[in-house]
Image (tube, rainbow, N blue to C red):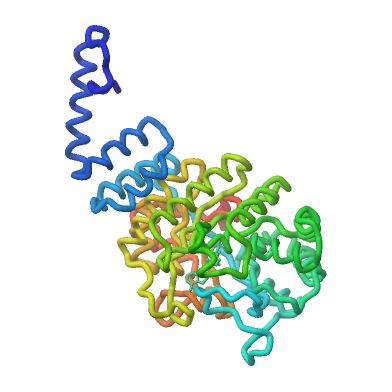
Amino acid sequence: MIRPDSVQNFEEYPRWQLLAGVREIEIRMRFSFDSKLQDIAFKIEDGERLSFEDGVALYNTSDLNALGKLADSVRRQKHGLTTYYNVNRHFNHTNICVADCKFCGFYRRARQEDSYTYSIEEGVEIARNAVAEGATELHIVGGLTTKLPFSYYTDLFSTLKREFPKLHLKALTMVELDFFARFYKMSDEDVIEQLKAAGMDSCPGGGAEIFAEPTRSRICDHKCDGSRWLELAGKVHKAGLKTNATMLYGHIETIEDRVDHVVKLREQQDATGGFQCFIPLAFYPPGTALSTLPGPDAIDNLKTIAVSRLMLDNFDHVKAYWVMLGKPTTQMALHFGANDVDGTITDGGELTHAYSVEEGGESKMTKAELITMIERAGFESVERDTVYNRVEKVVG
Ligand code: V47
């Protein structure tokens, strides 16, 4: 489409094309009352990358409908109406953690009465139940503990793989890998290769929190910084494994911190290309050192999904994590750029349970409930495995 404002020599263009351009601008004028959004809409249409300033402008708009429409147009271009879910289970092998993250209500010190560590046999039983319920993925993360040898992880993964060869092990965040390298005095490459050889199939996106300093240090100064998180993600990608990426928002961070976070992820994705999915995690204050904060509201949640979809032009998937958002906001998020809702999740009442915004701390949805949630929102539900292959429905 030719835009009259970009035309230098009017004689070169047929009149109908110029009129079409005028019409397009007229439509744009009605599209949003926020002139900054109109400029951004042109960029998106032209496939132009959005800048840091664009990201901030998107967050600051009060035209939520226009923002949602823009993100939805990108989502529909990439995925149509398809919305992914999976059948998975979380396994949090220990809640013992030496870090002291202000946003975390899950961790315990080893001496505390309610600290726990599962044995490998207990892990296998949890996986057995998950597989019996149709799970294709086990999501394994835990605290940073000095109480376990490195062989706990390799034995756990190899035992799980021997028992359940088809179960995808999405295990360990970049923060855990960093801790292993430092605590067990191994190179990053050795840590990754040994875990991969034992059965680690991909890595979840946790531990990213918010990269920007000084915010990161104020909420989690005991764990690796943002550049180290990104460096490790790059190394895992180079080892041939996919990872996800998250952002914890709605605590003490600024809008600029959030945009900086997604820009850094976009740069890393340009460099190593192994991120599959971006998952904004809405901060849930109860039970944490930041419990007096209100946490993000629905508008903030929807804006964050939409801005992420628009800024992360090199990420295939944006996940509306229903556990943090609750079902109603998750349904709306599907109209604001998200194309995935995560999965059935079932856990033993551990980490996800601690953060669930669902009534009564419920942290499980059946496959039928997930499908209904997606389809009532007007989308087509597709079961996927961890790396986004369709799981074919078994007929008969
Ligand atoms: O890194 C901790 C977050 C993350 C709170 O990769 C909190 O598919 C909200 O990364 N309120 C762990 N969030 C969970 C995670 C994840 C979840 C689902 C799917 C995937 C994936 C990854 O949970 C932590 C932290 O950012 N978190 N405490 C809290 N109070």
| Res 197 visible | no
Q: What x and y, as percent, mark residue 157? A: 76, 65
Relative height, residue 384 to residue 289 (above, below):
above
What residue appears at the point 48 percent right and 79 percent down from the top-left corner? 288
Q: What x and y, as percent, mark residue 341? A: 46, 59
Near-viewer residue (23 or 236):
236
Relative height, residue 109 to residue 389 (above, below):
below
Give the residue at the far top of this rendering: 11
| Res 12 visible | yes
Instruction: Name the image quarter holding residue 169.
Output: bottom right
Q: What x and y, as percent, mark residue 9? A: 25, 10
Give the residue at the far bottom of this rendering: 113
What residue appears at the point 67 percent right and 75 percent down from the top-left corner? 93
Near-viewer residue (391 or 36):
36
Near-viewer residue (192 or 118):
192
What residue appears at the point 62 percent right and 67 percent down from the top-left corner? 223
Instruction: Name the image quarter holding residue 108.
Output: bottom right
Q: What x and y, as percent, mark residue 122? A: 72, 79
